[in-house]
Image (cartoon, rainbow, N blue to C red):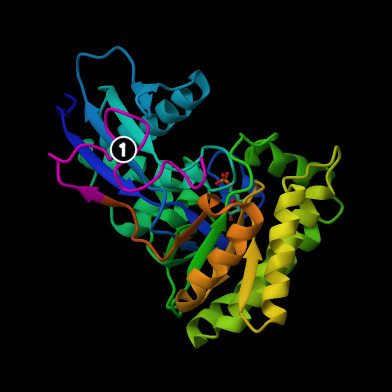
Amino acid sequence: MTTPPTSGSATARAFPNLALVKYWGKRDEELILPVAGSLSLTLDAFPTTTTVAVDPGLDGDVFELNGAAASDTAAERVTAFLDLVRERAGATDHARVHSVNEAPTGAGLASSASGFAALARAAAAAYDLDLDTPALSRLARRGSGSATRSVIGNVALWHAGADDETSFAEPVPAPDLAMVIATVDTAAKPVSSREAMRRTASTSPYFVAWITSTETTLTEMVAACRAGDFTRIGEITEAHAMRLHGLIASTEPPIRYLKPRSIEVMDTVVALRQEGVEAYSTADAGPNVAVLVRPEQAEAVAARLGDVVGPEKVRTAGPGPGAHLLPDAQPPAGAGGPVGDEGPAGAGS
Ligand code: PMV
Protein backbone atom coordinates (compact mmCIF):
# COMPACT_ATOMS: atom_id res chain seq x y z
CA MET A 1 0.00 0.00 0.00
CA THR A 2 1.36 3.40 -0.87
CA THR A 3 1.21 6.20 1.66
CA PRO A 4 -1.09 9.03 0.54
CA PRO A 5 0.88 12.21 -0.16
CA THR A 6 0.37 14.69 2.65
CA SER A 7 2.00 18.01 1.99
CA GLY A 8 -0.73 20.08 3.57
CA SER A 9 -0.33 23.13 5.70
CA ALA A 10 -2.79 24.58 8.18
CA THR A 11 -2.87 27.26 10.86
CA ALA A 12 -5.07 27.07 13.94
CA ARG A 13 -5.65 29.18 16.99
CA ALA A 14 -6.76 28.12 20.46
CA PHE A 15 -7.10 29.84 23.81
CA PRO A 16 -6.25 28.71 27.33
CA ASN A 17 -8.98 27.73 29.73
CA LEU A 18 -9.31 28.16 33.45
CA ALA A 19 -10.86 25.28 35.31
CA LEU A 20 -13.75 26.02 37.66
CA VAL A 21 -13.79 22.35 38.68
CA LYS A 22 -10.18 21.19 38.45
CA TYR A 23 -8.60 18.24 36.74
CA TRP A 24 -5.90 16.69 38.92
CA GLY A 25 -4.75 13.11 38.51
CA LYS A 26 -4.63 10.57 35.71
CA ARG A 27 -5.87 7.02 35.84
CA ASP A 28 -4.13 6.26 32.55
CA GLU A 29 -0.88 8.14 31.89
CA GLU A 30 -0.56 7.17 28.25
CA LEU A 31 -4.12 7.86 27.16
CA ILE A 32 -4.39 10.78 29.63
CA LEU A 33 -7.64 9.60 31.16
CA PRO A 34 -8.43 11.68 34.26
CA VAL A 35 -9.48 10.31 37.64
CA ALA A 36 -12.52 12.62 37.55
CA GLY A 37 -14.30 14.99 35.19
CA SER A 38 -13.69 18.75 35.18
CA LEU A 39 -15.22 21.97 33.88
CA SER A 40 -13.63 25.17 32.60
CA LEU A 41 -14.05 28.53 30.94
CA THR A 42 -12.15 29.00 27.69
CA LEU A 43 -10.76 32.55 27.59
CA ASP A 44 -10.45 35.13 24.83
CA ALA A 45 -6.91 36.14 25.86
CA PHE A 46 -3.41 34.61 25.61
CA PRO A 47 -3.95 32.58 22.42
CA THR A 48 -1.60 30.10 20.85
CA THR A 49 -1.40 30.20 17.05
CA THR A 50 0.19 27.22 15.38
CA THR A 51 1.06 26.37 11.80
CA VAL A 52 1.75 22.77 10.82
CA ALA A 53 3.34 22.36 7.40
CA VAL A 54 3.94 18.80 6.24
CA ASP A 55 7.26 18.57 4.41
CA PRO A 56 8.29 15.29 2.73
CA GLY A 57 11.89 16.52 2.61
CA LEU A 58 12.36 16.53 6.40
CA ASP A 59 14.16 13.78 8.35
CA GLY A 60 12.35 14.73 11.56
CA ASP A 61 9.82 17.25 12.83
CA VAL A 62 10.95 20.83 13.38
CA PHE A 63 9.33 22.77 16.23
CA GLU A 64 9.77 26.49 16.62
CA LEU A 65 8.17 28.25 19.58
CA ASN A 66 7.91 32.03 19.70
CA GLY A 67 10.43 32.41 16.90
CA ALA A 68 13.17 30.16 18.32
CA ALA A 69 13.95 26.43 18.30
CA ALA A 70 12.00 24.81 21.13
CA SER A 71 13.66 22.83 23.94
CA ASP A 72 14.29 19.11 23.36
CA THR A 73 11.56 18.18 25.83
CA ALA A 74 8.99 20.36 24.10
CA ALA A 75 10.06 19.08 20.67
CA GLU A 76 9.75 15.46 21.85
CA ARG A 77 6.21 16.09 23.10
CA VAL A 78 5.25 17.63 19.77
CA THR A 79 6.74 14.72 17.81
CA ALA A 80 5.00 12.16 20.03
CA PHE A 81 1.75 14.00 19.36
CA LEU A 82 2.33 14.23 15.60
CA ASP A 83 3.13 10.49 15.58
CA LEU A 84 -0.41 9.86 16.83
CA VAL A 85 -1.84 12.06 14.07
CA ARG A 86 0.35 10.38 11.43
CA GLU A 87 -0.63 6.94 12.63
CA ARG A 88 -4.31 7.78 12.22
CA ALA A 89 -3.77 9.49 8.87
CA GLY A 90 -1.61 6.67 7.52
CA ALA A 91 1.11 9.23 6.84
CA THR A 92 4.86 9.15 7.42
CA ASP A 93 6.07 12.63 6.39
CA HIS A 94 7.39 14.97 9.05
CA ALA A 95 6.30 18.56 9.59
CA ARG A 96 7.47 22.03 10.48
CA VAL A 97 5.54 23.40 13.42
CA HIS A 98 5.62 27.12 14.19
CA SER A 99 3.86 28.17 17.31
CA VAL A 100 3.36 31.55 18.91
CA ASN A 101 2.13 31.44 22.47
CA GLU A 102 1.03 34.70 24.02
CA ALA A 103 0.75 33.45 27.63
CA PRO A 104 3.56 33.42 30.17
CA THR A 105 4.75 29.82 29.81
CA GLY A 106 4.69 27.58 32.88
CA ALA A 107 2.97 30.01 35.22
CA GLY A 108 -0.30 28.18 35.71
CA LEU A 109 -2.17 29.80 32.84
CA ALA A 110 -2.45 26.47 31.07
CA SER A 111 -0.34 27.30 28.03
CA SER A 112 -0.22 23.57 27.33
CA ALA A 113 -4.02 23.67 26.93
CA SER A 114 -4.04 26.28 24.16
CA GLY A 115 -0.83 24.78 22.74
CA PHE A 116 -2.10 21.24 22.24
CA ALA A 117 -5.62 22.33 21.23
CA ALA A 118 -4.14 24.51 18.46
CA LEU A 119 -1.68 21.79 17.48
CA ALA A 120 -4.44 19.16 17.32
CA ARG A 121 -6.62 21.38 15.11
CA ALA A 122 -3.78 22.40 12.76
CA ALA A 123 -2.18 18.95 12.56
CA ALA A 124 -5.50 17.21 11.85
CA ALA A 125 -6.10 19.61 8.94
CA ALA A 126 -2.52 19.45 7.62
CA TYR A 127 -2.60 15.63 7.62
CA ASP A 128 -6.13 15.54 6.15
CA LEU A 129 -7.77 13.92 9.13
CA ASP A 130 -11.48 14.58 9.16
CA LEU A 131 -12.39 14.74 12.85
CA ASP A 132 -15.61 15.92 14.46
CA THR A 133 -15.39 18.06 17.60
CA PRO A 134 -15.48 15.22 20.17
CA ALA A 135 -12.77 13.38 18.21
CA LEU A 136 -10.65 16.53 18.10
CA SER A 137 -11.13 17.00 21.83
CA ARG A 138 -10.00 13.40 22.41
CA LEU A 139 -6.96 13.95 20.20
CA ALA A 140 -5.97 17.16 22.04
CA ARG A 141 -6.29 15.21 25.31
CA ARG A 142 -3.35 13.04 24.27
CA GLY A 143 -1.11 16.13 24.28
CA SER A 144 -2.22 17.59 27.60
CA GLY A 145 -5.28 16.91 29.73
CA SER A 146 -6.49 20.48 29.95
CA ALA A 147 -6.20 20.81 26.12
CA THR A 148 -9.26 18.52 25.91
CA ARG A 149 -11.35 21.48 27.07
CA SER A 150 -9.69 24.23 24.97
CA VAL A 151 -11.09 22.59 21.83
CA ILE A 152 -14.48 23.83 23.10
CA GLY A 153 -15.44 27.49 23.47
CA ASN A 154 -16.91 29.14 26.57
CA VAL A 155 -17.83 26.63 29.30
CA ALA A 156 -16.55 23.11 28.63
CA LEU A 157 -17.28 19.92 30.55
CA TRP A 158 -14.65 17.20 30.21
CA HIS A 159 -16.20 13.81 30.92
CA ALA A 160 -13.79 11.53 32.74
CA GLY A 161 -15.18 8.78 30.51
CA ALA A 162 -14.63 5.06 30.76
CA ASP A 163 -12.02 4.86 28.00
CA ASP A 164 -10.38 6.80 25.15
CA GLU A 165 -13.65 6.99 23.19
CA THR A 166 -15.71 8.48 25.99
CA SER A 167 -13.25 10.94 27.53
CA PHE A 168 -13.84 14.25 25.72
CA ALA A 169 -15.19 17.73 26.37
CA GLU A 170 -18.46 19.29 25.29
CA PRO A 171 -20.12 22.68 25.77
CA VAL A 172 -22.37 23.40 28.73
CA PRO A 173 -24.83 26.34 28.73
CA ALA A 174 -23.81 28.93 31.33
CA PRO A 175 -24.49 32.54 32.30
CA ASP A 176 -22.10 35.27 31.13
CA LEU A 177 -18.80 34.93 32.95
CA ALA A 178 -15.57 36.91 33.00
CA MET A 179 -12.17 36.41 34.58
CA VAL A 180 -9.85 39.00 36.04
CA ILE A 181 -6.36 37.53 36.07
CA ALA A 182 -3.77 38.86 38.48
CA THR A 183 -0.30 37.81 37.41
CA VAL A 184 1.78 37.19 40.49
CA ASP A 185 4.83 35.52 38.95
CA THR A 186 5.71 34.49 35.40
CA ALA A 187 8.62 32.19 36.30
CA ALA A 188 8.27 28.54 35.32
CA LYS A 189 6.65 26.46 38.07
CA PRO A 190 8.96 24.48 40.38
CA VAL A 191 7.26 21.14 39.69
CA SER A 192 5.39 20.38 36.45
CA SER A 193 1.71 19.51 36.80
CA ARG A 194 2.46 16.10 35.28
CA GLU A 195 4.99 15.30 38.02
CA ALA A 196 2.88 16.90 40.75
CA MET A 197 -0.13 14.79 39.77
CA ARG A 198 1.98 11.63 40.03
CA ARG A 199 3.27 12.68 43.43
CA THR A 200 -0.26 13.40 44.61
CA ALA A 201 -1.53 10.00 43.52
CA SER A 202 1.35 8.14 45.14
CA THR A 203 1.75 10.10 48.40
CA SER A 204 -1.36 12.06 49.39
CA PRO A 205 -3.69 10.42 51.89
CA TYR A 206 -6.44 12.69 50.57
CA PHE A 207 -6.32 11.55 46.97
CA VAL A 208 -9.23 9.11 47.13
CA ALA A 209 -11.42 11.74 48.81
CA TRP A 210 -10.42 14.19 46.07
CA ILE A 211 -11.59 11.80 43.34
CA THR A 212 -14.97 11.03 44.89
CA SER A 213 -15.70 14.59 46.02
CA THR A 214 -14.74 16.07 42.64
CA GLU A 215 -17.37 13.97 40.84
CA THR A 216 -20.03 15.25 43.27
CA THR A 217 -18.77 18.83 42.88
CA LEU A 218 -18.87 18.51 39.11
CA THR A 219 -22.49 17.38 39.09
CA GLU A 220 -23.37 20.36 41.28
CA MET A 221 -21.41 22.73 39.06
CA VAL A 222 -23.07 21.54 35.84
CA ALA A 223 -26.47 22.07 37.50
CA ALA A 224 -25.45 25.59 38.61
CA CYS A 225 -24.26 26.43 35.08
CA ARG A 226 -27.47 25.18 33.48
CA ALA A 227 -29.53 27.11 36.06
CA GLY A 228 -27.53 30.29 35.34
CA ASP A 229 -26.73 30.52 39.06
CA PHE A 230 -23.65 32.78 39.11
CA THR A 231 -23.35 32.80 42.89
CA ARG A 232 -23.27 29.03 43.17
CA ILE A 233 -20.82 28.76 40.25
CA GLY A 234 -18.54 31.17 42.07
CA GLU A 235 -18.82 29.45 45.45
CA ILE A 236 -18.04 26.05 43.96
CA THR A 237 -15.15 27.48 41.95
CA GLU A 238 -13.44 29.00 44.98
CA ALA A 239 -14.01 25.98 47.21
CA HIS A 240 -12.70 23.55 44.60
CA ALA A 241 -9.57 25.61 43.94
CA MET A 242 -8.79 25.66 47.66
CA ARG A 243 -9.26 21.90 47.78
CA LEU A 244 -6.84 21.48 44.90
CA HIS A 245 -4.15 23.54 46.59
CA GLY A 246 -4.79 21.76 49.91
CA LEU A 247 -4.41 18.43 48.12
CA ILE A 248 -1.19 19.52 46.42
CA ALA A 249 0.19 20.73 49.74
CA SER A 250 -0.54 17.30 51.24
CA THR A 251 2.02 15.52 49.05
CA GLU A 252 5.39 14.28 50.21
CA PRO A 253 7.60 16.16 49.67
CA PRO A 254 4.97 18.93 49.73
CA ILE A 255 4.38 21.22 46.77
CA ARG A 256 3.10 24.76 47.09
CA TYR A 257 2.32 26.79 43.98
CA LEU A 258 0.74 29.81 45.66
CA LYS A 259 2.94 32.73 46.74
CA PRO A 260 2.27 35.23 49.54
CA ARG A 261 1.08 37.67 46.89
CA SER A 262 -1.42 35.07 45.60
CA ILE A 263 -2.93 34.88 49.11
CA GLU A 264 -3.06 38.67 49.26
CA VAL A 265 -5.11 38.68 46.04
CA MET A 266 -7.41 35.99 47.44
CA ASP A 267 -7.92 38.01 50.64
CA THR A 268 -8.80 41.05 48.53
CA VAL A 269 -11.45 38.96 46.79
CA VAL A 270 -12.95 38.04 50.17
CA ALA A 271 -12.95 41.75 51.10
CA LEU A 272 -14.67 42.60 47.81
CA ARG A 273 -17.44 40.13 48.62
CA GLN A 274 -17.91 41.70 52.05
CA GLU A 275 -18.41 44.98 50.20
CA GLY A 276 -21.10 43.37 48.05
CA VAL A 277 -19.10 42.66 44.88
CA GLU A 278 -19.50 39.06 43.84
CA ALA A 279 -16.03 37.79 42.98
CA TYR A 280 -14.50 34.35 43.51
CA SER A 281 -10.88 33.34 43.21
CA THR A 282 -9.23 30.32 41.69
CA ALA A 283 -5.70 29.30 40.72
CA ASP A 284 -4.33 26.46 38.62
CA ALA A 285 -0.92 24.87 39.18
CA GLY A 286 0.84 28.19 39.54
CA PRO A 287 0.83 31.38 41.61
CA ASN A 288 -1.41 33.49 39.38
CA VAL A 289 -4.90 34.12 40.64
CA ALA A 290 -7.95 34.27 38.39
CA VAL A 291 -11.07 35.90 39.73
CA LEU A 292 -14.46 34.91 38.43
CA VAL A 293 -16.83 37.86 38.08
CA ARG A 294 -19.92 39.02 36.24
CA PRO A 295 -18.73 40.80 33.07
CA GLU A 296 -20.18 44.15 34.20
CA GLN A 297 -18.07 44.06 37.36
CA ALA A 298 -14.80 43.06 35.72
CA GLU A 299 -13.46 46.58 35.43
CA ALA A 300 -14.06 47.50 39.07
CA VAL A 301 -12.51 44.24 40.28
CA ALA A 302 -9.52 44.71 37.94
CA ALA A 303 -8.90 48.15 39.47
CA ARG A 304 -8.90 46.68 42.99
CA LEU A 305 -6.54 43.84 42.10
CA GLY A 306 -4.32 46.37 40.33
CA ASP A 307 -3.77 48.00 43.72
CA VAL A 308 -2.36 44.67 44.98
CA VAL A 309 -0.18 43.45 42.10
CA GLY A 310 0.18 46.55 39.94
CA PRO A 311 -2.29 47.63 37.25
CA GLU A 312 -0.06 46.38 34.41
CA LYS A 313 -0.26 42.86 35.84
CA VAL A 314 -4.02 42.58 35.66
CA ARG A 315 -5.82 41.40 32.59
CA THR A 316 -9.52 40.87 32.01
CA ALA A 317 -10.75 38.03 29.84
CA GLY A 318 -14.15 36.96 28.63
CA PRO A 319 -15.33 33.70 27.14
CA GLY A 320 -13.31 32.69 24.09
CA PRO A 321 -13.92 30.41 21.12
CA GLY A 322 -12.87 26.80 20.76
CA ALA A 323 -9.86 25.79 18.67
CA HIS A 324 -10.38 26.92 15.08
CA LEU A 325 -8.58 27.09 11.76
CA LEU A 326 -7.37 30.42 10.41
CA PRO A 327 -7.26 31.24 6.71
CA ASP A 328 -4.05 29.86 5.23
CA ALA A 329 -2.57 33.17 4.21
CA GLN A 330 -2.73 34.55 7.72
CA PRO A 331 0.60 34.18 9.54
CA PRO A 332 0.61 33.32 13.25
CA ALA A 333 -0.05 36.33 15.45
CA GLY A 334 3.31 37.85 16.27
CA ALA A 335 5.21 36.05 13.49
CA GLY A 336 8.70 37.46 13.45
CA GLY A 337 8.82 38.09 17.17
CA PRO A 338 7.68 36.71 20.48
CA VAL A 339 5.03 39.36 21.01
CA GLY A 340 1.74 38.95 19.18
CA ASP A 341 -0.41 41.60 17.61
CA GLU A 342 -3.41 40.77 19.79
CA GLY A 343 -2.09 42.25 22.97
CA PRO A 344 0.77 41.79 25.35
CA ALA A 345 2.69 38.51 25.42
CA GLY A 346 1.16 37.78 28.77
CA ALA A 347 -0.27 39.91 31.53
CA GLY A 348 2.50 41.76 33.22
CA SER A 349 5.29 39.91 31.47
O1 PMV B 1 -3.14 19.74 31.39
P1 PMV B 1 -2.11 19.78 32.44
O2 PMV B 1 -1.35 18.48 32.54
O3 PMV B 1 -1.21 20.96 32.33
O4 PMV B 1 -2.85 19.92 33.89
C1 PMV B 1 -3.53 21.09 34.27
C2 PMV B 1 -4.12 20.96 35.62
C3 PMV B 1 -4.70 22.23 36.20
O5 PMV B 1 -4.51 23.33 35.34
C4 PMV B 1 -4.04 22.57 37.52
C5 PMV B 1 -6.18 22.06 36.49
C6 PMV B 1 -7.09 22.08 35.29
O6 PMV B 1 -8.16 21.50 35.38
O7 PMV B 1 -6.76 22.72 34.28
**Label 1 crowd (10 A; few <14 / some 14-19 / many >=20):** many
Left or right, residue 305 beside residue 271: left
Q: Main secondary structure of the magenta part?
A: loop
| Residue 154 appears in the picture as rendered | yes
Residue depicted at 61% across the width and 80% down the height: 277
Q: Which residues are magenta?
A: 325-349
**Which SS class for mark 1?**
strand
Q: Amino acid at mark 1?
A: Thr
Q: Does residue 228 sit above or below 272 in this rendering?
A: below
Residue depicted at 34% across the width and 58% down the height: 322
In x, y percent, where is residue 174?
45, 78
Residue depicted at 52% across the width and 47% down the height: 110
Residue placed under numbered mark 1 in the picture: 50
In x, y percent, where is residue 165?
44, 55
Within the magenta stretch, is there residue 206?
no
Left or right, residue 106 beside residue 335: right
Q: Quadrant of the N terminus?
A: top left
